[in-house]
Image (spheres, grey):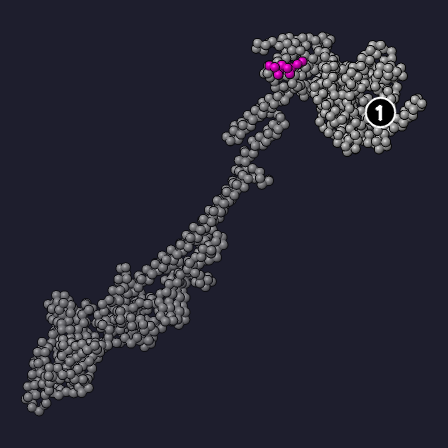
Amino acid sequence: MHALRNRVSAFIAHIFLLASLSVQAADYYFIVEDGSGRPLANTSISAPAEAHSISAETTSPQVSDRPAIMDQINKTFAPGTLAISSGQRVRFPNSDNIRHHVYSFSPAKPFELKLYSGTPEAPILFDTPGVVVLGCNIHDSMIGYIYIANSHVYTLTNTQGIASFKDITVIDTIHVWHPSLSPDAQTILELKLSELPQQTLNNETYFVIRITPNTAPIAPKKTFKNRLLNHENK
Amino acid sequence: MKTNSLRAQMLTLSVSTVLITALTILSAFWWTTSNYTQQQVRVHIDSALKVFNQFLESRQQQLFISAEVLTSDFGFKQAVASRDNATITSALLNHGQRINADLMLLIDLEGDIVASSDETGAPGTPFNHPLLIQKTLDAGGATSFVQLGDTVFQIILLPVKAPLTIAIAGIGFRLDLSVVQHLRNLSGLNVTLISTGQGIPVTISTLAPETQPSALKSPSEVARAALLPFHQQQHFSSHKLNLESHNDSSVDVVLTEHLDEAYADFNRLGWNILTISGVTIILAILGSLLFSRGMTRPLNTLVALAEKFAKGQYIKVHTPSSVTREIGTLMNAFSKMGSEIEKREQHITYQAMHDPLTGLLNRATMLERINLLTNETGAPFVLIACNIVGFRIINDNFGPTTGDFCLRAVAQRMTHFGEKHPLLAARVSGDEFLIAISHHAEYSEQLSHALMEHLSSPMTYGEIIFTLNFRFGISRFPDDGNNASVLSRRTSIALDAARKEQVSLRHYKEGEDDAHLLRLKTISNLKQALNSDDGQLFMFYQPKKNLVTGRIEKLEALIRWIHPQEGFIAPDYFVELAEQSGQIDQLTDWVISQVLKQLAQWQQSGLSIQVAINISAHDLERESLLNNVTHQLSDLGLPHHSVSFELTERDMMQNADLAIELMGRFKKQGFSLSVDDYGIGYSSLSKLKQMPVNELKIDKSFVLQLDQSESDQIIVQSTIDLAHSFNLKVIAEGVENQATQEVLKSMGCDYIQGYYLAKPMAAADVAQWISNHEKSISTLSA
């Protein structure tokens, strides 16, 4: 879905480029790996805002009008990570038949939504670039992320850790974000493409991005609480 | 009390039993109780520890729940996320109040305190337990005991998740005296909380300050030795539990058991046992005293009884019913023993006093009884020594059974006689009896005859009729003596006299006893004289003259005795006594040695003469005599013919054949033999013919009045002729005047001996007399 949308955006952008005929276009391929060399999925890569000045008139109404969706299915956020551009709205439909109390204390957008099944809420505008960490007050284990890019060029790596920008203006830096970059998941890396190692794959040149996690596993198997309660039961 | 007395032993036994029991109980008690106390303390501490742990856990639970409540609260999360310190602080305080927490902390992810309800944790200062922070982040929470300032808190750290961990909340409960006291109430042990290494050491304790140091140092195990009764050494037992330790800081809790109460119980029990033991010992002493008395009293009675028994008083003892069965049995046995002994004693006494065969008294008893009669009653009685004539023949011919029967019959007759005439009868030896019959008015001789008649009547044994003959020797009380020994001796003398005189009844004659005693004395003196050879016995010599030559060729050795006290004792008398008392051997030997010595002396001085020694039949039979003589002769160097022997006709004829043989031996040795006192014995001429003698000595009875008595002359003449016809020399002894000598000379007698010639003289005088005699002969013939 995202890919499709990206493609569409890229295509439209490409058309603009063709129309202007004054701006250069390029394709960029990225592969993201974690500290042990495994592909890292759901890593956001976006082109910085300076690379593309986004004026109000160039903003695609389709883009800005169509809200992204962060659903709650089976007590999980779906998708786990959502990449949008600032100014975009996100809808929280709640496909579960139970109530969710979604909240975020992230500086990019603090909000809370009491979501009842079947009672839709108005979509929320995310107009500050950054990372929003979503939680559910009722279900402590629910964590979701919304990456708000400060441009329209953004993507998420797939399960192979691969993402690409197609036919965009030439860029020399990218913003990379993964929750594991910091305990509060707010850290966004700004990387120079020229400093990135490259790897040839399927006749294409990939920029290799290595991300080392900076936090303990988020959901430990044996919580302190369990231990305490187990102790009580003994 | 001596230690070997029954009483003392029983006392010792009972007291020592109680003591040993008490001591055993006490030690066993001490052992088990100290074990128990040790265990109790251990158990106590263990359970206290469990309680304590449980308490801490439940507090932890409570803390956790409270903390969770806090950290789950949306409003709180919101406040924390707002990063507004004031908001956070107020939220902390508010929530803290809700859950009654003593300490609220909010710590950021770098480990610095963001907000705190306590002034010790100022915002911005680090929370000095980085490990706890790390643990909270890693494991999702942590709990610990920390000291902040001078207070020890039990804290829980939980992450504040929104939904990622944005901060760490800490909730703490103070551990103060009330907690510690509560713990003490729960566990029953003293609780001391000690925190070191996190600033000033903190100690919170339920122990009194003065006991703290020693109590806390005391060991966790209760040493057994420390639990000696009444000697409490260990007052406390402490067990340390470490709650928290990091590097050089630690929080410990010490559980202390106060042992005094355990001891108090212990000591109390100990005293009880001691008291009981003491009382029991006293009771034991009393009991054993009583019991031993119950034992010793009858024993003492028996001891007294035994002493009486020893004295011969066999008292009947009454067994009281209060004694124990064993003592009672003993007393009964004693009684029985007493009566048995008495019976036996009586039996033995009877046997001691009576002759077993006849049932009459025995000698000793008889004499006692006689003494009783003489001393007490003074009534006259006769004492008869009664002997059965020829009893040995009956025994030999008819057997001892018959003999016994006769004796018993005699005894019965005596007893029977005694029915009419009270008497005492005893059997004193084989066939000899002693009877004492009191006589009042009756003449004793009649009584004696009556008894003899009674005894002599015939008796029948089987098919044989015996008529026994008796001999009585009688003495009278008080005429013949006034005690048993004198009377019995005199009665015996009378009996002996009866035997000698061959009469059946003989009274004691006055003086006989004296004569008897004199004989006894003389015998004793003779023995002494012979043994001492001190000169009271000496030899006289009487010359014999050859009627033809008129020379003295022979002497007769005659023994003389002048006793230092008694004076002169007649040779016939003492020689006969010697023969009767068995001293004749010794006497004869003595005579021989004297004579031979004398002969040797005479020979040395040139006198060669033959000496005749008188010997008896008994001497003749002695083999040693001949050897003795020959040896001495050879030792002294004397020829055999210097000695001749004179043997009385009577002695020779006693056992003529034997005499012939024995005399033959003498003859063979070259000794001359003479028949002494010839003519008055029972010689048989046929035997005389065979006698190997050299000489006949005519008895002096025929010679004394030879010159006047015709009958004597005829006898003497025929005797001389007879002797000459047997080739024997004749010597007449008892020549007292010349007329007799002349007669004898004319009859052809060979030798004379007598007062006319010479009286017996001392050895020293012999030589001189002979020489004088020789001179007179030569004067006559000249």
Is-magenta flag for residue B395?
yes
Count of numbered tags: 1
Q: Give the range drawn in magenta.
A: B389-398
B149 and B489: which is toward the camera: B489
B720 and B334: which is toward the camera: B720
- Which quadrant would the N terminus of chain B be assigned to in this image? top right
Instruction: Note whether residue B680 is visible.
Output: yes
Horizontal placement of B568 versus B504: left or right?
right
Query: Residue B735: horizontal and vertical position, in percent?
Result: 86, 17
Which of the 4 quarters of the picture holds residue B108? bottom left
Q: Main secondary structure of the magenta part?
A: helix
Q: Chain letter of disc 1?
A: B
Which of the 4 quarters of the picture holds residue B107? bottom left
Instruction: Identify the residue shown where x is 52% and y is 43%.
Output: B16
Horizontal placement of B284 versus B767: left or right?
left
A181 and B688: which is toward the camera: B688
Image: A60 above or below B743: below
Instruction: Identify the residue shown where x is 24% and y is 66%.
Output: A222
Query: Residue B697: horizontal and vertical position, in percent?
Result: 80, 18
Instruction: Identify the residue shown where x is 46% and y is 52%.
Output: B264
Image: B277 above or below B449: below
Query: Mark 1 highlights which residue?
Result: B553
Instruction: Note whether residue A108 is visible.
Output: no
